[in-house]
Every structure is written in structure tokens, then in C-alpha cells.
Image: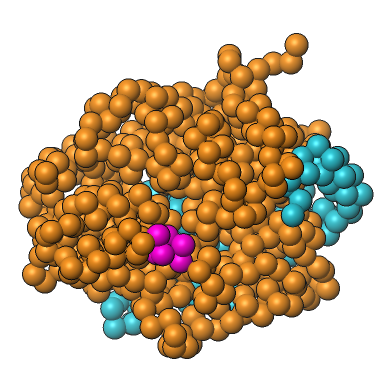
Amino acid sequence: MAAPKTLFDKIWDSHVVRRDADGTCLLYIDRHMVHEVTSAQAFEGLRLARREVRRPDATLLVCDHNVPTTDRGKPIADEDSRIQVETLENNAAEFGLPYFPLTDIRQGIVHIIGPEQGFTQPGMTIVCGDSHTATHGAFGALAFGVGTSEVEHVLATQTLIQKPAKNMRITVTGSPHPGVGAKDIILAIIGRIGTAGGTGHVIEYAGEAIEALSMEGRMTVCNMSIEGGARAGLVAPDETTIAYLKGRPMGPTEDEWDAAVAYWRSLPSDPGAAYDKEVTLSAADIEPLVTWGTSPEDVLPVTGAVPDPGTARDEAKRRSMQRALEYMGLTPGTRLSEIPIQTAFIGSCTNGRIEDLRAAAAIAKGRKVAEGVRALVVPGSGLVKKQAEDEGLDAVFTEAGFEWREPGCSMCLAMNPDKLAPGERAASTSNRNFEGRQGPGGRTHLMSPAMVAAAAINGHISDVREFD
Amino acid sequence: MDKFTTLTGVAAPLPMINVDTDKIIPAKWLKTIKRTGLGPALFEAIRYRPDGSEDSGFVLNKEPYRKAEFLVTGENFGCGSSREHAVWALHGFGIRCVIAPDFADIFYSNAFKNGILLIKLPQAEVDKLMEDAEKGENARLTVDLERQVVTRPDGEEIHFEIDAFRKHCLLNGLDDIALTLEKKTDIAAFEGSQKSATPWLYL
């Protein structure tokens, strides 16, 4: 009787092409998503070595990081951005690869379009030159980010040279209170384990609170696994997963469906499977959370106050907290709910899906964005945008004074026109609050979509539970 | 890829923890379609003043660290974004070896793909090397990859562990893709069985 295996073990073992004596494996990759920022040098490498892409059918290309979220009918104004986008388009044509151009309704943020299309499925190995590839783990896939050299390796060989990670399980028990959702759950987890808590591990998220999440909620949680140091995060596939996948364009055909579902049902971790690390949180203990500093681990309840560096565990951490407070322009003891914002951003691969927009719209409905606040809503794909418009969410946002934009990574990372000015403070549904992330000198506070909407309305970080 | 066997050079101290790849190279530099030319952009936000002039207080702007080939730094170096551009910027500047208590996973893989040696050592050993690095003109270290030893300016040797496969590739300057393509038949055989067992994976 073979030893019980975790979901990660099962996916890993079923993808090993070769295993060397020292444990280094050649791992087969089922799906490779490619965007314009991390692929140019990889395609150039293929070209110089006269190599082809081994599995065009398993590859999907899209532009998302550089694209403007307005004036899409015009050529891209920034020359470097335009060149990067054109380079990807030329590479798609030259190497014969599936590509969604900007004019295609299916275009959007790479980690939003893969699941929409059914390109992402349970049991797969999935990579992309982007650390938030972890998002796809929501489907019970082993999905992780790689650098450009590994992008080139996958294009040429459809494999990666890898050693297996360790298994970590994070169990979230019970149910969250109203006003608390998937974004708060993952921020709570990162606050608990720290930005290196998952290094060397893949995280399996388990427990009632995780199982109760929709696929979009699970994607939000898995998306930020990398901020906790784990290259990948997974949720076991279940009936919620199967229901989401039915009928998706790039998923199993009708003839293949039953066999695929049977395979997916075999994937969840075996009872008694061993994990190298286990952490448990109670969902009922989680409040709406915000980040105050320059690391995703700098998390506090919105009812809290800016911390004092004097409370740090050691000198290095104290220096780091002090630096963060100076960068963020915050004083210890200031109530988080008094911190004014100048910009509100709803979007990104973390929270750019229809449920995120619904949650924000529910807060925005019948209210107005505060004087002096710039508020953007960026749907994660053309399909999300269309669905939102069919539901009238765009009108809710624009009547409230939010700008309704075109799909792209937008203000998450300052590679396109949507940026913060130095010293400008934003409430953001994105995933990183590093120094300069949203623009040099930009000050980012991460939180959920409903919390960003609340902050936009009040003009300061606010407790969404105070809105009826 | 160049071989990495031994290296002797100046070590720059960067006593910060959780240095993320946005700090190592800001997003605007990711618009390049080349691997080269990023040396001047390394640590841009903390290396230059807003007007673009060098901040004379930043370590890499001071002698002898302007020619540093080693970087000694704090835990979780290279966390955050997977951008390999962070490694290219370090390489472009001239750094060939980084020493820290630990590194983020993706950054770790990326560095070895570009001939940069990352050495994980216990905090106490890193602290000694950080002190050495703060010695200005005497901040010279040697690393011998074959022997897995870092030698301090006073001659003390510190042993480090490293994965055998990564060591082998670095010592011999091996190209991963060429190595893997030698196993093409294994890959094709895998695809054959996978396609039979789970045909929906093949579009």
C-alpha cells in the first residue's frame, strides 16, 4: 500500500519525466501562459538557437502589464510599451502561438483569462513568467511563476528542471463574519506566516472557510501565496471547481468530460498525507484588514493603529519598520481609519473579477466618491467588463464618480499610464505595497474591493462594516 | 553561460531584510527587450536622488564598492516579483555572488540561470561577513565553489552547502536547454502516455 499523498505530491509525481539520483526532476508542464514583459528575451533566445515552441497548443499569449486602460483605439503612446506589445504580437505570429489581441474581448490579465477560458484545470502543472501564476492553484493545479530563462526553457522543451517543494497546509476553520472575505483571509494568513513563511513550500489551503469560497475567492487567496514566500498555493478541486469548469471553451470536450471529472476527483490529498508545516487560523477571528507598511505582511485590522517600531522583535525588524513608517509618512498610534487617501484602485489579478466588482459596487451604489479622490475600476478582462456592464455595475460606478476602465494590470505596478505620484496614497485591491510599487514614492495600502470602495467614498481608510 | 569556479573581490554590505525585486529593479526597466544594460538601474530608487544624481550615501556609490563583486545582505533577499531583470541588473553592475541567510525561491532559480552564485549561511556567519564587508578597501572575500568555501579577509574559511546539480552547472557553465534537449526521447515518451491517459490536456 503506497504512502498517502498530498495533492501537490500527486500532481508532482504524475509529471516527472525523469528523476536523477539527487532528487532533481525534469517536470512536464501542461500549460504555459505568456505575457509581453517577461517573454521577449526568451523568444529571442529561441530564435538565435533556431528552436521551435514544442507545444503551441499548450501555450497562450496576451498583453496585460503595459497596456493603457483608456484610449484603446489609439496606438500606445509610451514607445517602450508599444515595442514590448508589438514584440509579443510578432512572436505570436512567428512561432504560431494562440494570442488574444487587445481588440479581442477575451483579452485581459493573464491570470484572469486562463481560468475564464478553461485553459486552467485541476491536476495540471501551469507556469508563466509572473509570480502571481500561483492564482491558478485555486483549481487544484500546481501553478507557479518563473523567470525569463525558464520561460525560454518551457517554450523549447515543455519541461522545467526542478526539485520538489515541501508541503505546507494552512487550514482556515469556521466562517468569516460579514464584511470579511477572501482578500482578508489571505492577508490574515500572510500577516501570520510572514513574507518568508512559505519559502521552499507549496501551500495547500484547506478548511471550511476555504471550501466555502467561490472559485473567484479561491483565486484571490491563491494569488497572494507568493507574498507569503510560497511559490505555489493550491485548493483541492471539488464540486465547486467542477461546476465552474463545465462548458469552458478550452476545457475538456463533452466526450472527454466524464473521464476528466473522474480524474479531478482523484486528486484531493489522501487521508493521513503528511505535511512538513501546518498552520491553522479561525475565520471568525479575522476582521477587515489593511496593510500599513511596505510589505504584505504589515497587516492590521482596520480598527487598529499604526504600530510603534519599538515593539519590533529585533534590531533589523525595528529598522525595517522605521523605514516603512518614514516611507509611508505615518506616525505610530495614528488610527488606520483616519488615514486619508488620494487614489482608490479596484482591479488586478488579485481582485479584478466579477464578484470583486459586485462587492465594490454594493458599497458604491447610491453614494459618491469623496472630493479630491481619484477612483479607478479596472475589470480584469473583456469578458468581466461585459458581464459587469450587462449587470449595470459600470453605471453604478460612474454615477458614484469612479472611472470605468479597459482590462489590464493598470495601477498594480506602474508599467502603464496608471501610476501614483510621489507621496500619493492609495487604497488598492492589488497584491504588493513595496516601496515604489505603484509609482516612485507611491504609498500603497492593500485591502479588499469593498474596503477600497468604502475608502473612496469616505476619502480615508474606512471600516466597510459601518456601511449598511 | 560563463563558468563560475573561484571569485575574489570586494564585498558590499547591504544590511536590509526582505529586499524585494521591485527595490532591486523598478518596473519601468522591465520594458526592455534585452537582458543587458540594466547595471545602472540596480537599486535605482535608493541609489539615486530624485534629480537622477547619485546618492553618495548609498553603498554601491562609494569606493571601493563601486567595483563590488559580492553582496552581503539580510534574510529573504529577492522576494516578490519573479522578474529575472533583478538578476540581470545585479549581473550588469558586476555582482557575481550574493551571501544571505536565505533567498526567495524564484530569485534563487533565476540567479543560477545567469551564472550568479547565491550562498545561504546561518545568520551568525552572515553577520561576520557583513562586518568584513564594512571594512572598505579591506572588504575582500574569496569564494571557491568546488571546495564550497568562502574565505574572509583574515583567512578564516566558512563552509557552505549547495545543491549538487546547481553547483555542477555553474562550475561548467552549462546551458540548461541543451542539457534537457538531450532527453528529448524521454519527453516524447512522457507525452505519449500522458495523451493516452488524459487526452483533454492536448488541444
In which quadrant is the N terminus of chain A drawn?
top right
The magenta-colored residue range is: A382-387
Q: Which chain is cyan?
A: B
In depth, the one of A206 and A9 nearer the eye is: A206
Residue A384 seen in the figure: yes
Disc tally is: 0
Residue B97 among magenta residues? no
**Position of A59 relative to A72 (above/below):** above
Q: State the image coordinates of residue B186 (x, y, percent, origin top left).
A: 88, 45
Hey, which residue is sitting farthest top in the picture?
A1
In this rendering, position of residue B30 left or right of residue A414: right
**What residue appears at the point 27 percent right and 45 percent down from the top-left corner?**
A298
What colour scheme governs how the chains and residues are painted in the rendered image of this protein?
A: by chain
Which one of the lettered chains is coloured orange? A
Quarter where residue B26 is shown: bottom left
> Horizontal and vertical percent for residue A118?
59, 50
Q: Considering only vertical position in the picture, is A294 above or below A178? A: below
Which residue is at the far right?
B185
Q: Nearer the viewer, residue B173 or A44?
A: A44
Q: Position of residue A369 (x, y in %)?
A: 14, 65
Seen at 77% across and 65% down, the residue is A53
Q: Residue at x 22, y 35 (%)?
A: A178
Left or right for B9, reference A333: right
Q: Is residue B72 left or right of residue A90?
A: left
Q: Is residue A164 something one can see in this rendering?
A: no
Q: Residue drawn at (75%, 72%), measured in percent from left and top?
A: A95
The quadrant of the rendering that contains the C terminus of chain A is: top left
Query: In terms of image quadrants, where is residue A341?
Result: bottom left
In terms of secondary structure, what is the magenta stretch mainly? Answer: helix
